[in-house]
Amino acid sequence: MKLVSGFGVRFVRNSRFIHTPSRHGQLLISSIFCKTRSIEKLGSARTRLYSEGPLFGNHNNTFRTTTKQGAYGCTEVLNQDLVSDNMRRVPLAYEVVSENSSTYFPKPPVIILHGLFGNRANNRTIARLLNERLERDVYLPDLRNHGASPHIGRHDYPSMAADVEQFIQERNFEHEPIIVGHSMGAKVAMSVVLRKPELCSMLVSIDNAPVATVPTMSFPRYVKKLLEIIENPKILTFADAEKSLREIEASPVIRQFLLTILQRVKDETGASPSGYRFKSRIPLGILNDAIVKGNIANWEFNPWVHRYTSPALFIRGTRSHYVADELLHDVGRFFPRFEVGDIDATHWVNTEKPRECSDLIADFIERHEEL
């Protein structure tokens, strides 16, 4: 296992930490030099840590744009839309894993957010493992338009983050929680701590990075195929649905994941010979619209304005492309105290390797709580 931090690379070898310099430290030094030089020009009256920089009319910090963004400019432009609380929020359905929680010494709870098309059930195994080892409550919310949470037309990171912020604030936790997210849920978790850094004590991002990417084509294919299954009265069983999914998805793990979106209900039309047919648990139209418009792949936060300086762990599946080495510089700009843990898995690392994933998370939490 290799751990990478913002100031270099740490290799675990015979329980000893060996520090080696890396290009990430050089990049950080260059960034600090740029900021310092700009601050000197601004004069002693200014006390902020970031440079003002030139104001670009077409900067990358507006969630209304849906195209792939380029490199961040030296600009400090605060987009109020990204941090606004003036949006409709929804109450999130959730469950709590608390069987092994300590009643004598309350500890910061853990909140785990699922990915696109997922729900709270995706992370139950990790939640049980963390609850057993860390002896604290682990919360599993359903994000908007997923699971048992309300369906609503707006589906982007500011709105999803606002829901989670309300979820945290309403519970009035004794200690600031640790927020964990996978895939889309990882970007929601990152959005929460960048919007309100004081709300959470640590961040864990599972196989996603704070960058805009080209919208993936796999999820629109999934939507199309799921709609075909729902509209076809001849598909009677989950075995039939799984066979249909094979036409567009080779991975049995992903097919089983997609089957959790479907549920069998009584057929009111009488078209199905069995008297039952499938319906979707989630609003496929709303989510497909968010996908094709780029709301899921996009990332609008600006590291010159938004930073989270508490500990952050980025877990990567080594057979996934979501957090490539060249993206670690972007990670460091938003999260200067970041670390990276690699697991031999695909993008679905949380379901493929829940034990390894929970061990990395628990080690990270225990180490930083001891400081």
Image: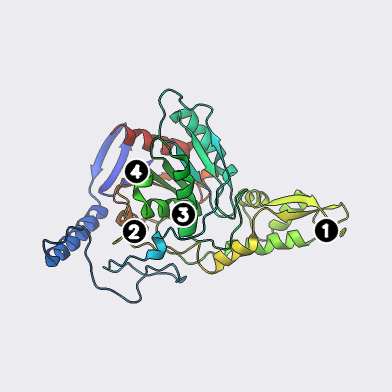
Mark 2 / mark 1, whichever is N-terminal: 1
Q: Are marks 4 and 3 in contact (CB under 8 Å)?
A: no
Residue at x-position 23% and y-position 69%: 53
| Label of residue 330 in the image | 2
Q: Position of residue 252 (x, y in %)?
A: 64, 49
Mark 4 / mark 1, whichever is N-terminal: 4
Numbered disc 2: secondary structure: helix
Q: Amino acid at mark 4?
A: Leu
Q: Are marks 2 and 1 in contact (CB under 8 Å)?
A: no
Numbered disc 1: secondary structure: loop
Disc 4: which residue: 3
Colouring style:
rainbow
Q: Which mark lies nearer to you, 3 or 1?
A: 3
Q: Is residue 6 left or right of residue 118?
A: left
Residue 367 in the image: above or below residue 86: above
Q: Residues within 10 Å of mark 4 (few under 14, many from 20)?
A: some
Q: Which mark lies nearer to you, 4 or 2?
A: 2
| Label of residue 162 in the image | 3
Mark 3 / mark 2, whichever is N-terminal: 3
State how far apart marks 2 and 1 are (Cα): 49 Å
Q: Pick the residue in front: 60 or 236.
A: 60
Numbered disc 3: secondary structure: helix
